[in-house]
């Protein structure tokens, strides 16, 4: 099937209440139906986000098929897919590299500004360049697509005094409506289930879409997000008491001090130009500049703290003051359209991109004696459920630089979809990347070719079988004994399965079997140094392997019933055994929405997630390694919405319905979110 793009928006005719989209550029930048993409793709629409109150990117990923998370503390979360850490995030298809050392607030980005979020699982090097073979997440912003004055106002209140206000307003800016504007703004204030914790967030997004001609549209946009947290945690609570038994603190215990904070700010400005030719071809140009900053003061109590079970004494910790900036400038352009060859219709996409990302971070530690904690057990005092964080702030040393690196990527990429026969299509493509880094991590230049291949066979009008090979690479700054930088880590993803589409694409299903291989992983060479210096030498070795199966059903079962159900099972191993054992290898995720036929004003829904047992190997007080388990657990949620009038609706949501207690991180104990509720009122005009 060949899909024609007639406007800059791929989903302009999409029913906005559905959980599925009919076309996507995920995976290849070719405009295809989800059934024609030879990889597993999940789409989370704005309607799904509204129904389930998925208000941050973190909320979305925690409810996406095949994605699991690790919440290290109140502010930081890391994501995994098919056994590997997810590091590939894009905004309207523009990649941003997100490291695992510092939190710039990306996962806390508010989803009110996004039309949908698309997740492609497996290696995605064709679209993202460097990265991991886990998956990629593409956040697609809302556009100014209304020629009438319209909008929504929303106010909500929930657990822990959470107050949220959002306005989304669109309007024509000239009489003909060829120039349109949209502004989305919001403010949120909340406490937390942790003692003394509070967080304020605000965001503003504005976009102008101008039809320069009947076939040309220019978009200019600005996105600002700010989050300010008081008393955030760094890590969690101690796992062991001094006698070696496991701790059991209240979920509300906050290990932070009353002088701690975490502040993040993000600013993005972009310009898009889309031109559609009469022959079906389209040209897309994008320029983006983004600046993210963070600053913090933090207290760490936990990993090597072993307080007395009865007295609570003996916990120690250390403080850190940090700041950083990430600056990205990116330009991307590509053309896509149909062509004829040997009497058959095919599709071609080709483009080039350039990005420059500058990362710089600084820290200051408390002034201490060498090998001593800057916050002693006497400073901490009695660490138990009554601990209030009222301790003296340490004296801070001079600022020192952690990193100052500039990463550049210059790429050329192409993909073609060949119609080999009426039921059979072949997608082949490749990306050539010149990757360079300069700065404190070293100066390195690497060139890489990332191939892509996929085959789709239409069994009938509903079902298709597919197979694909995709790849990705990640340069590394380790050097071997001769001083040469190691070859990039490579990820290869093999996938085969079945896809189906019903009701004109409103409901889709995917059954996939996959295997991912990682190679050229840097490993220390014991006793070997670079050119006989003091720098540790590394060699490459075979990395982790994962294999498994996934299933997803997403969309409209009937006009009144929407559903998303996802199931994942995989096994990941490296040379030392199980890989990332703190991540569940069996996960189920379900969410439904039902509009009552006999009472059209009432919509109800809910869902449940379940994951299997996981474990973490922690260090006990006697120095031994002890395995700590989190048993399997379900989390249920409900929602109901009533359309009071044509313009006014009221919605209620409950998360963690049965108030299950569980750990989201076990290197220190970090509890997951307890039961909570929210009630919101929306006014549409």
Image (cartoon, grey):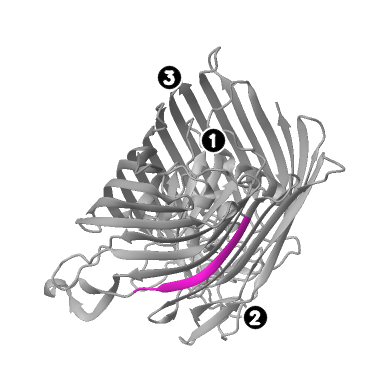
**How many angstroms separate mark 2 from mark 3 (CA)?**
73 Å
Q: Nearer the viewer, residue 11 or 426?
A: 426
- Magenta stretch: dominant SS? strand
Identify the residue at horizontal 49%, vertical 30% (top origin). Answer: 7
Q: Quadrant of residue 642?
A: top right
For label 3, count other residues whose C-alpha is less than 10 Å away and answer few (under 14), some (14-19) or many (20+).
some
Q: Earlier in the sequence, mark 2 or mark 1?
A: 1
Q: Foreground: 72 or 150? A: 150
Residue that label 1 marks: 142
Q: Which residues are magenta?
A: 543-553
Q: Is residue 96 visible?
A: yes
Q: CA distance from mark 1 to mark 3?
A: 19 Å
Which secondary structure, mark 1? loop
Tell me, yes or no, whether the two marked residues, 1 and 3, touch with CB atoms within 8 Å: no
Q: Label 3 belongs to which residue?
A: 212
Depth order, front residue of 248/358: 358
């Amino acid at each position: 099937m060949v899909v024609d793009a007639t406007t800059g928006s791929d989903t302009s005719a999409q029913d906005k209440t559905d959980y599925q989209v009919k076309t996507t550029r995920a995976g290849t930048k070719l405009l295809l139906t989800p059934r024609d993409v030879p990889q597993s793709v999940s789409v989370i629409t704005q309607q799904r986000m509204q129904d389930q109150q998925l208000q941050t990117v973190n909320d979305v990923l925690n409810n996406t098929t095949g994605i699991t998370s690790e919440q290290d503390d109140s502010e930081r979360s890391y994501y995994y897919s098919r056994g590997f850490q997810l590091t590939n995030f894009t905004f309207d298809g523009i990649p941003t590299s997100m490291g695992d050392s510092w939190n710039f607030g990306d996962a806390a980005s508010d989803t009110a500004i996004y039309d949908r979020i698309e997740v492609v699982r497996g290696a995605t090097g064709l679209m993202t360049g460097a990265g991991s073979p886990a998956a990629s997440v593409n956040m697609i912003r809302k556009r100014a697509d209304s020629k009438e004055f319209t909008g929504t106002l929303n106010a909500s209140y929930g657990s822990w005094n959470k107050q949220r206000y959002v306005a989304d307003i669109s309007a024509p800016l000239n009489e003909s409506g060829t120039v349109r504007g949209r502004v989305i703004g919001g403010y949120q204030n909340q406490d937390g289930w942790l003692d003394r914790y509070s967080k304020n967030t605000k965001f503003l997004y504005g976009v102008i879409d101008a039809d320069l001609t009947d076939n040309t549209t220019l978009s200019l946009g600005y996105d600002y997000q700010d989050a300010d947290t008081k008393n955030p945690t760094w890590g969690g609570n101690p796992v062991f008491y001094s006698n070696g038994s496991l701790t059991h603190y209240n979920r509300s215990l906050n290990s932070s001090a009353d002088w701690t904070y975490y502040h993040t700010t993000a600013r993005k400005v972009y310009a898009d130009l889309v031109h559609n030719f009469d022959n079906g071809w389209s040209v897309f140009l994008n320029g983006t500049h983004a600046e993210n900053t963070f600053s913090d003061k933090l207290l760490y109590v936990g990993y090597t703290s072993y307080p007395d079970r009865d007295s609570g004494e003996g916990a120690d910790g250390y403080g850190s003051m940090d700041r950083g900036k990430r600056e990205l400038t990116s330009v991307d352009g590509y053309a896509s359209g149909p062509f004829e060859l040997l009497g058959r219709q095919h599709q071609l996409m080709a483009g080039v991109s350039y990005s420059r990302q500058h990362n710089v971070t600084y820290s200051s530690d408390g002034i201490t004696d060498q090998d001593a904690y800057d916050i002693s057990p006497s400073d901490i005092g009695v660490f138990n459920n009554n601990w209030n964080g009222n301790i003296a702030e340490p004296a801070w040393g001079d600022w020192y630089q952690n990193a100052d690196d500039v990463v550049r990527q210059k790429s050329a990429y192409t993909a073609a979809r060949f119609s080999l026969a009426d039921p059979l299509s072949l997608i082949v493509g490749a990306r050539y990347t010149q990757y360079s880094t300069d700065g404190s991590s070293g100066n390195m230049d690497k060139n890489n070719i990332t191939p892509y291949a996929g085959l789709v066979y239409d069994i009938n009008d509903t079902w298709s079988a597919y197979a694909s090979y995709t790849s990705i690479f990640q340069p590394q700054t380790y050097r071997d004994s001769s001083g040469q930088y190691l070859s990039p880590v490579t990820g290869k993803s093999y996938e085969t399965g079945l896809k189906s589409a019903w009701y004109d694409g409103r409901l889709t299903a995917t059954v996939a079997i996959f295997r991912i291989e990682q190679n050229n992983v840097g490993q220390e060479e014991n006793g070997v140094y670079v050119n006989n210096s003091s720098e540790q030498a590394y060699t490459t070795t075979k990395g982790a392997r994962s294999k498994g199966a996934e299933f997803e059903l997403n969309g409209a079962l009937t006009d009144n019933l929407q559903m998303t159900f996802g199931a994942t099972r995989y096994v990941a191993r490296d040379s030392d055994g199980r890989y990332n054992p703190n991540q569940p290898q069996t996960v189920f995720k379900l969410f439904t929405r039902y509009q009552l036929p006999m009472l059209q004003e009432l919509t109800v829904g809910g869902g449940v997630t379940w994951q299997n047992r996981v474990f973490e190997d922690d260090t006990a007080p006697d120095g031994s390694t002890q395995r700590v388990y989190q048993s399997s657990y379900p989390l249920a949620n409900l929602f109901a919405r009533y359309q009071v009038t044509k313009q006014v609706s009221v919605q209620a949501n409950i998360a963690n319905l049965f108030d299950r207690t569980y750990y989201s991180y076990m290197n220190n104990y970090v509890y997951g979110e307890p039961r909570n509720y929210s009630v919101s009122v929306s006014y549409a005009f």
